[in-house]
Amino acid sequence: MSSSDSGATPVRSGLTERRNRRSVGLGFFASELAVLFRRRRTWAMLLALAAVPILIAVAVRISSSGSSGRGPAFIDSITQNGLFVGVAGLTIAIPLFLPLTVGVVSGDSIAGEANTATLRYLLVSPVGRIRLLVVKYLAAAVFCLAATLTLSIAGILIGIALFPVGPVTLLSGDTVSIGDSLVRSLLIALYATVSLLGLSAIGLFISTLTDAPVGAMAATVVLSIVAQVLDSLSQTEWLHPWLFSHYWLNFADLLRQPIEWSSFGQNALLQLGYVFVFGALAYGRFSSKDILS
Amino acid sequence: MTTAVIASPSELAIKTDGLTKRFGRQTVVDDLALSVPRGSVFGFLGPNGSGKTTTIRMLLGLAQASAGDISVLGERMPQRLGGVLPRVGALIEGPGFYPFLSGSANLHRLDSADGFAPRGTRSERVAHALDRVGLSHAADKKVRAYSLGMKQRLGIANALLAPRDLIVLDEPTNGLDPQGTREVRSLIRSLADEGTTVFVSSHLLAEIEQMCTHAAVMRAGRLVAQGTLDELRSAGATRVSITTPDVEAATRVLLALGLDPGLPDATGPVAASVAGAASAGQPGTILSAALPEAVAPEDIVAKLVADGVRVRGFSVDHASLEDLFVALTGEGFDVVQ
């Protein structure tokens, strides 16, 4: 055998032919999404999120005896216009329900694979550790989008069903058409998606630290709560602009005419920073990790 | 191919030099120098906890070596991991699958992780791999409903998804029934016939003895033996045993031939067979001696008969792999960790 046998390719049938160049990884990304959305758990979480605006709408419809003076301001306005139900649902879900589901998906990303022992088989396939991290992160981001869209759409649909629908009066006092208000609902869902990108990166990093997915999920959710608590304490005011949850509820600026984009930009920039920092940490940890699970 | 184990690097499917792995202060793999020739079926033996799986994890780039060099299929690992691993199929310490996906969906998923695997032939290759391990009938069943043996087969199917130059199987017959074990053996043989190098770790010696051409034995992280099966067997001495009533005359003959005869261990199984022979009306004592390579067994018999020794039984016994294994790694559960 010659010394150049490493490149030797015996005659092989079409069935056994190998590609000479590596694919970009779209196939694996599609496979990752398929695995994510074939899990009953994912659908259970999306259904639970869809239930949030539905419960609000039904509760308000049953007991619509005017303003109670409590709860978020949006709640009262949904009796006047059903299109607000989606926004009200997002407002309620952002502090806890959305972080909970995002924590489950991102915390499970690597630790879950380690737990089912599929991680070592993916790595010897070989998937490439960086590619795996990127695909896992992108899938978590897709879930964020699916989660916020589910909430918004479920809210709008139940709103249309239970309440009068008409042109929407914005916070700035202007009135916009139904079509325009639907676009703004979509923008708010996008804002909430962007808001969750930082938390997803944190979850991904925590997920590389352990083989126990439940631990990684819990830690991610706890961090999201800690950040919101710190954000509400005046003693830690210096820290507030750096907390990933700081701009979570600032989407009201999207309900002005003209749209005030600055909070969207600030939020996106902050989340991007978290993605880079925790993405780098996850890479640093995962690229040299011994896979012993 | 000669029986020489030390071949030039290009003829080795796996080669390690001074491979060492430490976890904290514990050295799990210590200065390992493996040489796995291409085309061989290589048995990787050792008691539980001797460092076999850790070695396999390092070979496949799952764990980093604390020291030493690894080359797989002629390329350095883990530096050339992306180019090497598509040509390697592996089953590592039990199968791992998504319980909520079917067997075939699991294979599709793992195949899509390999960026070199052509998508066009994926369904065909998955079906072929499932067929090879006899799982076609359960292809659409959720893995959650698979038995341990079926999961093990699915793990082997995953290793066969693409044409491989090297297949690494860690305890492939774990959880399989006797039929399954036989099928895996014949599968390994057919892979070897196709020219694939197969690296099998196991602690089941009979299994290794039946299907391997080469073997290495690990003990407490160190390599204690390596070579072709014949070389390993001959490392354990071949012995001759003679059953005869004329002990003194026979001893004289054996000494003259340069052997060192002695009565076998009175507590061993041989003593029991002597007792059995004696009760059957064939009184005789068994003399046993290591057989030097220079002496042919038939010459011993001829000389004994020529000198009037009454030979009632004569046998040449090769050490079994199990004798060697126990001699190298210690007996019972109390092995060195």
Image (tube, coloured by chain):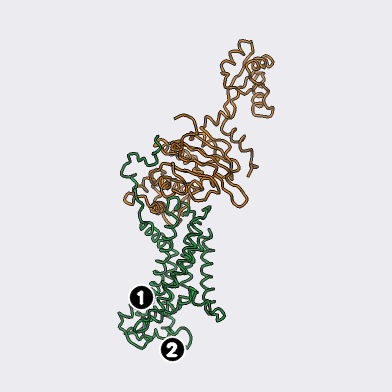
Chain colours: A green, B orange
Residue drawn at (49%, 35%) of the image: B212
Q: Tell me which amino acid carries mark 2.
A: Ser
The disc at residue A186 is 1
Query: Hey, which quadrant is residue A67 in on the image?
Result: bottom left
Q: Is residue B214 above or below residue B250?
A: below
Disc 2: CA contacts within 10 A as few (<14), some (14-19) or many (>=20): few
- Distance of mark 2 from mark 1, alpha carbons? 30 Å
Residue A46 lies left or right of residue B318; in this view the side is left
Sooner in the amino-acid sequence: mark 2 or mark 1: 2
Above-or-below relation of A283 to A225:
above
State which mark lies toward you, 2 or 1: 1
Which secondary structure, mark 1? helix
Residue B219 relative to residue A166: left or right: right
Residue B285, horizontal then vertical, whole percent:
67, 20
* Residue at 55% across, 30% down: B233
Residue B88, compared with residue A142, is above or below; it is above
The location of residue B123, given as percent across then percent down, is 34, 50
* Image quadrant occupied by the C terminus of chain B: top right
Q: Are marks 2 and 1 on the same chain?
A: yes
Of B91 and A79, the residue lying toward us:
B91
Report whether residue A38 is seen.
yes
Q: Chain of mark 2?
A: A
**Which of the labelled discs sits on residue A65, or is there none?**
2
What kind of element bears circle 2?
loop
Q: Give the percent coordinates (x, y) of residue A54.
A: 41, 77
Instruction: Name the residue located 31 percent from the left edge and 51 percent from the top edge.
Output: B120
Examine the image and state in which quarter residue B235 appears: top right
Residue type for callout 1: Leu
